[in-house]
Image (cartoon, helix red, strand yellow):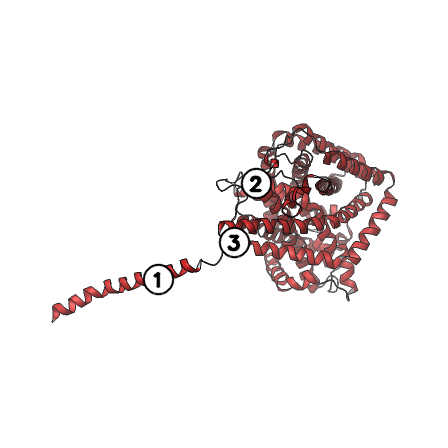
Amino acid sequence: MNSSSNQPNGKKLSPVFIYSAIIVAIVVIIGAVLPEQFDHVTNTIKLWITDKLGWYYLILTTFIVFFCIFLIFSPIGKLKLGKPNDKPEFNTISWFAMLFSAGMGIGLVFYGAAEPMADFAAPPNADPKTAAAYTEALRSTFFHWGFHAWAIYGVVALALAYAQFRKGEPGLISRTLRPILGNKVEGPIGTIIDVLAVFATVVGVAVSLGMGALQINGGLHYLFGIPNNVWVQAIIIVVVTILFIMSAWSGLSKGIQYLSNLNISLGAILMIAVLIIGPTVLILNMMTSSTGSLLNSFLLNTFDTAALNPQKREWMSSWTLYYWGWWLSWSPFVGIFIARVSKGRSIREFIAGVLLVPALVSFVWFSVFGVLGIETGKKNPELFDMTAETQLFAVFNEIPLGIILSIIALVLIASFFITSADSATFVLGMQTTNGSLEPSIMIKVTWGIAQSLIAFVLLFAGGGNGAEALNAIQSAAIISALPFSFVVIMMMISFYKDANQERKFLGLTLTPNKHRLQDYVQHQQEDYEDDIIEKRTPLRDAEKAEK
């Protein structure tokens, strides 16, 4: 065991903090002072990546999915993320709630109705607003929010949890690469990797907070006529910042756990209510047929670059390739957090939980809100032209109990907002204190305030409608995903090399030992013969007695 197995001091800042803070500050200042130029440059690079490297993103994400499936059935799956006697810190329901809240959160509410409606109006292959477009809309949404997203999160989290809890490494992205880079992970190379992870986290969270503020403001404006401007958004950010700092102050096991359970409860109430009020039978039918369509065309859509299909190619640039880059850029944040709350679980249990359960819940969620949105849009065509942050509230306005559902949705967005920010402050604190599992309160609060300031600056740069500034930063997130994708590849290689070596050492295998198998078969044969003789003896005695 190396020296890094000692628990780092949660109050001591690492060089990663200084370098990442400088880079983030430069990017944000440029984005705020020169939003148009910044948007142009980042958008140009993003378009180049999606145009020239779309095939790479598709192959990489597909490989990650099948790597996770392989681990479920591999003997490696028997290994525990921790020492042999370690037990899970959180019960299964709380564990699932936390990983789901951190991984999807605001996006589920933001795009619940918006993405299926957008794909219905402008599908990848079918004619707009047709029966074929209906199935394509739901299938495409399932595809984007299903197995690929959670597989990306899963491999990053798995490599981290394995290195951290089984090998005694600090919870840093760089330390997962020790099996292939050796002690170089403790030098400049390791620092560069960790700075990249922190940058991706900060950028991703800033966008999420900005989206959350915009949607809350959009909902309040639509429902109550509250002005939709930068100052209202600033007030929303201040209130939410105070709440998530209070949550961060209370610690992981209390704050995030309670909030995550609240998220799941509110989300379940909202989804069940919409399922009952909406076209229930149609929702269930479309969910079933769209899931079948997804599975039937999974390999085709997974590998399809649409090289000769201009319609789908343009659609993929706006959706699929954007999402794949987005999930990759978010994977350090979500992966680190999921790893932190998954100590004590087996690799098989971890992968199955992370890959399957959230994906299935996402299918149900998007079926409920997507079908309701499309059906409501058919009756009110103007809904298809509305912005994503107000579409959900506009849909609710057209159904019974709409005002109550809208208020629940607003509370849910705020709760997801707090949970994501709270989780991010923990992750950023951990990454900038040499991987400490207990970063100091002040460091977490510092990152929390910094995140909120970044989100406000971006919204301010957009003049209250932060779409331009947020889109620029989203482009930056996709750009940051490219170099981090190579880190993910190295993480998978490194994890497999180390875990497979340990698997061999422990003698874990799917096939039994040949000699033991022979002994077992021989033993079973002898037992069978003895059993036959034992059963026949009374019959023979009875026959002799009759004679």
Q: Which of marks 2 and 1 is nearer the N terminus?
A: 2
Instruction: Write down the quadrant of residue 167 in the picture.
Output: top right
Q: Which amino acid does label 3 sit on?
A: Pro
Residue 119 visible to an observer of this rendering: yes
Which mark lies nearer to you, 2 or 1? 1
Name the amino acid, label 1.
Gln
Image quadrant containing the N terminus: top right
Across and down, in percent, residue 425 comes to 68, 35
Mark 1 vs mark 3, CA separation in Å: 26 Å
Q: Residue 491 placed where, x, y %? A: 65, 48
User: Distance between the Cα atoms at labels 2 and 1?
Assistant: 42 Å
From mark 2 to mark 3, how far is it between C-alphas? Answer: 19 Å
Above or below residue 79? Residue 544 is below
Taking depth in this image into account, of 486 and 95 the one nearest to the observer is 486
Q: In which quarter of the image is the C terminus?
A: bottom left
What residue sits 63% from the left and 34% below the top? 436
Rate crowding at label 1 as few (under 14), some (14 to 19) or many (20 or more) other CA atoms within 10 Å: few
Helix or strand or loop: what does disc 2 sit on?
helix
Question: Residue 161: where, in percent of width, then height?
Answer: 59, 43
Residue under label 3: 75
Q: Helix, strand, or loop for circle 1?
A: helix
Q: Where is residue 459 in the image (x, y as percent from the top left)?
A: 80, 39
Please, is residue 308 above or below residue 112 in the view? below
Q: Which of 20 and 289 is in front in this view?
A: 20
The kind of residue tagged 2 is: Phe
Residue 354 seen by the camera: no
Residue pointed to by mark 1 = 522
Mark 3, Cα crowd under 10 Å, few <14 / some 14-19 / many 20+, is: many
Residue that appears at 49% across and 55% down: 509
In front: 237, or 46? 46
The residue where tag 2 is placed is: 165
